[in-house]
Every structure is written in C-alpha cells, then in structure tokens.
Image (spheres, rainbow, N blue to C red):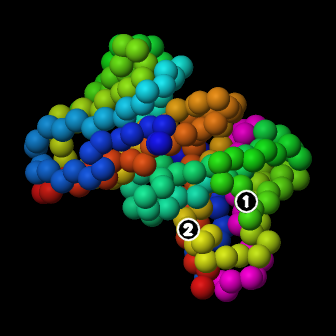
Amino acid sequence: TQLLEQSPQFLSIQEGENLTVYCNSSSVFSSLQWYRQEPGEGPVLLVTVVTGGEVKKLKRLTFQFGDARKDSSLHITAAQPGDTGLYLCAVLEDDKIIFGKGTRLHILP
Amino acid sequence: DAGITQSPRHKVTETGTPVTLRCHQTENHRYMYWYRQDPGHGLRLIHYSYGVKDTDKGEVSDGYSVSRSKTEDFLLTLESATSSQTSVYFCAISGWFGQPQHFGDGTRLSIL
C-alpha cells in the first residue's frame, strides 16, 4: 500500500482553466511538502505546510493541509503552460522520507 | 539555486561493471541523500548521510553503497551494475533530516 496517494496521476487541461490535485493518506503527518519537477531537472520545493487547516498561497497556486493533517491539496487558478510538470508531495514518516508518485500536469496553450 | 552538482549527467555501461556517481555541494549542509526515480515508483531513497563517514540505508539500498569522506561530497557506488539499476538518480541536500530538500539535476544511468 502506497503511503501517499496522489490523484489524478495525469491531468491535461487548457490554459486558463482551474485545477486541483490531491495528496492523500491514512496517516497523520507533522508536515507535508509539495515539489514541482520539470523534465530533465530535479524537484524544486514549492511549499511546506505544517498546521492542520493551513492555507498557503504562491501566486496562482493555493496549498491546503487537511484539518486532520492526513491530506493536502494544490489548487491552480488560471493555469498557464509554465505550470506544466510533475507535482510531488512528500512527508517524513517514522524517520523515513516518503514521496508520492506524483501528478503529471500538462497545460495546453 | 542551491549549489549541488551531480556527475556524470549521463552514463551508459554494461552489466557487471562498477559505477560511481558523484554529488558535490557548496552549501555546507549536513544531510545528503541519494534517490532513484522510476516510472510507476516515484522517488525512492537509496542511502543518506548525516555527516562525514556517517551514512544509513534508505528504502532501496540493496546493490548500492555510499561514502562521504568530505562534507561536500557524497558518492554512490554500484559495485556490479545490473539492468534493474537503470534509472535516473538524484542527489539532494538539507540542513536536517526531513527538512525540505534541494535536489541536483540528476544522472541518467543506463545499464545494458
């Protein structure tokens, strides 16, 4: 069983549309990180959420940590081609660093 | 960008040969990590280091060894490469364990 389930696995939408991707688990975490990875590059940290119910905004990206700290969502408003990439969530669990398999997002111009 | 350099960026080699990948950092971070990234599996931790000569195993450590003789360098060695080790390998660094990590740009390794 995958500790972190990311959904959807793939998403292809038109430029200007809104979207939400999810990172879910049955475990409680002290914090959760979101990364974006572009082809041929390593993941780049977008945000860390630490408090249940916390909302963080990064320009058109809104990150939310679930009240029970078991899940998180990433909402993108008015998606742009530059948002294309693999979005990964990650947690620290029992001294192990766990990454989800990611959501591959493609924004069509 | 955090100062992390991986070398080589690409390598093709044959089954049974030894392979060493290098990660070099200029940030003086305590923790360094080696991951592999494969379709359907995502990023998986191979080994990590928490100081010079201090290393520990990750989720998929079998067939890999590491060494850290200096703060800035972390080496990943495949003693006898197998085709199942064909992957993209990423190095990462952080100030403490589990802290958000800065990643290198990866090494694409093909074992034929």
* Residue for badge 1: B62
The residue depicted at 74 percent of the width and 82 percent of the height is: B16
The residue depicted at 48 percent of the width and 53 percent of the height is: B42
Relative side of A98 to A71, left or right: right
Q: Residues within 10 Å of mark 1 (few under 14, many from 20)?
A: few
The residue depicted at 76 percent of the width and 54 percent of the height is: B74
Give the residues in magenta. B13-34
From the top left corner, tell me how far across and down residue A44 is, in percent: 47, 45
For mark 2, give the secondary structure. strand
From the top left corner, tell me how far across and down residue A74 is, in percent: 30, 32
Asked if both marks, 2 and 1, belong to the same chain, the answer given is: yes
B87 part of magenta stretch: no
Count of numbered circles on the image? 2
B22 part of magenta stretch: yes
For mark 1, give the secondary structure. loop
**Is the residue A43 above or below the residue A21 in the image?**
below
Which quadrant: the C terminus of chain A? bottom left
Relative side of A6 to A31, left or right: left
From the top left corner, tell me how far across and down residue A90 is, in percent: 49, 37
* Residue for badge 2: B87
Query: Residue B85 sits in which quadrant?
Result: bottom right
Say which chain tag 1 marks.
B
